[in-house]
Amino acid sequence: MQEQDRFPIRLFNSLSRKKETFKPINPPHVGLYVCGPTVYGDPHLGHARAGITFDLIYRYLRQMGYKVRYVRNITDVGHLENEEAGTGEDKIAKKARLEELEPMEVVQHYTIQYHKGLDALNCLRPSIEPTASGHIPEQIRLVEKILKNGLAYEVNGNVYFDLEAYRKGNNYGELSGKVLEDLQAGSRDTEGMEDKKSPHDFALWKNASPEHIMRWDSPWGEGFPGWHIECTTMSTKYLGEQFDIHGGGLDLQFPHHEAEIAQCRGAHGTDPANYWIHNNMVTIDGAKMSKSAGNFITLDQLFSGDHEYLNRKYSPMAARFLMLQSHYRSKIDFSNEALEAAEKGYHKMMKAFSLIQELSFTGADEKGELDDEINTLCDGCYEKMSDDFNTAQVLAVLFEMVNKINAIHHRQLDDKSISQEVFQRMKATFITFVSDVLGLEPEADQQNSKTDDLLKLLIEVRAEARVNKDFKLSDKIRDDLKEIGITLKDEKTGKTTYEIE
């Protein structure tokens, strides 16, 4: 029996607001679409949260035997500053104007930076990474189809989705829980509203003003696509009019994902995805991350420590481990204290990861007294991950395995306590979940090598102090290292080893 049969995946569907058993449209094939970044700035902690969330889902689906086509777009045109009102400058065009660059220079630079950041976090690349500007003809055809179906209208070269017409047969707001009448009653911004039948009709195609750089020919004149139409176009192009999972950050539920559902129904008469998954946001010491608050941290700043908020630099794996400690639907709070604790947890996990690959353990020929307990732990990894991808609980199970691995290493468990078969299952499960599912990997050897050299030097100085009967210095080195989480161990052979917490 395959693991996907023993441990069926249940995921929280944002559309139904409940957990549902995952049933692909065309098993074992799975279509996964995730809204990627608008590439006009350096990748930050919010990008990391979304990247890691859907990397985990991608990894686990593959681990469970599914053949996944993972599509994540790059928005390189059409994302306006005030997208809800459909006003303001294109974010990429504005960045290009301020930096005196071509828009595609901006796109290329920040796409590379985005890839660099997510690669450092060990996020797998998607199967397909389409760009909005590379699919203009398909977007025009989709707009034409929505117009033909009577759910859009054209005014002065702008094409808007007609929400009043759509709502006669559909529930707009079903995904986000927004009530359109409440939004309209609270809206005072009338800029760019003159052509619209309703303030919340959103743009499918925008007429380009004379100064607008990014523009394409269309049946309605020169212009550019609306932000929402690109994802409907690219998701259905590569995954079909109906596919399995659509993902993105919680901030995209409205208006972006709500608009995607409306567009897909308007063009094809179907919902685009059977399951909607949204990751929650990142806060910094309990406050929303924003440039104005001074707590906006890019990935480069996190990895270099070059930010006034940070006490020091933190490794990509420490950041990844911190995110794994929270369920993807929970907010995650970044702080120096949380990062330092995550770093310690990561090092403990990776030490066990290294140990179990080197352990020489014969095991009992027959059933060992701990076999049932360890089998329960192995099953627990799959049970927790299959329960809406609960990485926090998976880590708790893995740390129970860490205790068993350390006990075997220190000879606190004899070979008869665990059968060879069950030991091998624990070893395979531990390695699979730490590396293949959670995506944790050993850090670069260079920093570890420098740490080793420094500690060896201190151990030599301490040994020389003991020979000279300078026990005050010897004890100070031992005690000071202990305070920062490094324990020296004097073995009977006279050799001194160390352990980093």
Image (cartoon, grey):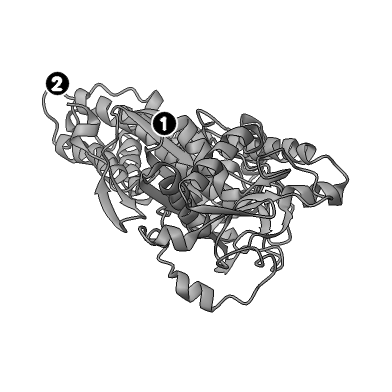
Q: Residue furthest right?
A: 100
Label 2 to label 1: alpha-carbon separation = 29 Å
> On the image, which quarter does residue 221 sit in?
top right
Image position of 413 with respect to 419: above or below: below
Image position of 247 with respect to 167: above or below: above
Locate residue 342, reporting x and y percent: 50, 51
Position of 397 with respect to 371 (left or right) is right
Mark 2 — residue?
A: 365
Q: Residues within 10 Å of mark 1 (few under 14, many from 20)?
A: some
The local secondary structure at tag 2 comes to: loop
Which residue is at the front of the view, 67 or 267?
A: 267
Locate residue 216, reporting x and y percent: 72, 38
Question: Who's the residue at 28% across and 38% down the image?
Answer: 412
Which quadrant of the figure contains the N terminus?
Answer: top left
Check contact, mark 2 vs mark 1: CB within 8 A.
Answer: no
> On the image, which quarter does residue 16 sit in?
bottom left
Under mark 2, the amino acid is Asp
Locate residue 304, reporting x and y percent: 71, 46
Q: Nearer the viewer, mark 2 or mark 1?
A: 1
Position of 453 with respect to 9 (left or right) is right
Mark 1 — residue?
A: 436
Say whether residue 330 is visible. no
Under mark 1, the amino acid is Asp
Position of 210 with respect to 24 (left or right) is right
Locate residue 485, reporting x and y percent: 54, 51
Q: Residues within 10 Å of mark 2 (few under 14, many from 20)?
A: few
Q: Looking at the image, tell me whether mark 2 or mark 1 is earlier in sequence order.
A: 2
